[in-house]
Amino acid sequence: MSPLRQPGGVILPFKDRNPHIDETAFIAENAVIIGDVTIGARSSVWYNCVLRGDMNFIRVGNDTNIQDGTIVHIDSQGFPTDIGDRVTVGHMALLHACTLKDDAMVGMQACIMDGAVVGEGSLVAAGALVTPGKEIGPGEVWAGRPARFLRKVAEGEQKMLDYIWPVYDDLGTEYRRSGYDLRRLSRNRPVPPSD
């Protein structure tokens, strides 16, 4: 075990499928990772996330961050979930049997459905619903319920996309270096009095 790696999350096999997590990845204490899930180098899976690769596979590339409360699942009829490198997935997003290409960003509480593809360097706005089978081209901004093309990614948005993933890489590294382990900390923390 790398000195930067702390045990984290509930990491479980499902049948003969075992998670494979790079030793440099950060997995939050209460994240749940089940089955055929691969997580790449320096990627992070934050608090209250569930990645369930039970009937198909989930792949998370390098330098990708899956932020708090996100659910990632698959479809048994041929749709895995494949998330590329340097992808940012905002808080409480739902990714179901979809593909996110390199350098994409999915905003908070967005939902990407079965067979949908988010193109390289694209941005899906917070709260958007990308319907089954929808293909978002590279460098596009989509928003709405259902999501529709708005425009190409603007210069300021591109700077944001380029800025976020390294911030989460550094943050995950800091969590690993700090030895942050809620199991250890919670045993030493007094229980607050009830009213």
Image: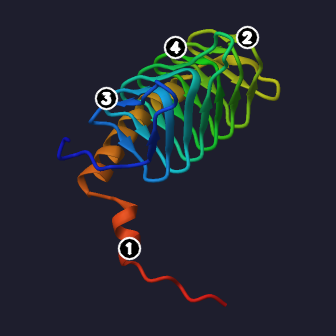
Image position of 146 (left or right of 61)? right
- The Cα atoms of the two marked residues, 4 and 1, are separated by 44 Å
- CA–CA distance in space, label 2 to label 4: 16 Å
- At 29% from the left edge and 45% from the top edge, which residue is drawn? 173
Question: Mark 1 = which residue?
Answer: 187
Q: Residue furthest right?
A: 146
Whether residue 192 sits left or right of residue 74 in the image: it is left
Q: CA distance from mark 2 to mark 3?
A: 29 Å
Residue topped by disc 3: 41
Q: Earlier in the sequence, mark 2 or mark 3?
A: 3
**Residue 183 visible somewhere in the drawing:** yes
- In the rendered structure, which amino acid carries the disc numbered 1? Arg
- Mark nearest the camera among 4 and 1 is 1
Q: Nearer the viewer, mark 1 or mark 2?
A: 1
Give the mark toward the camera: 1 or 3: 1
Quick one: SS at disc 3?
A: loop
The residue lying toward the viewer, choosing from 195 and 107, is 195
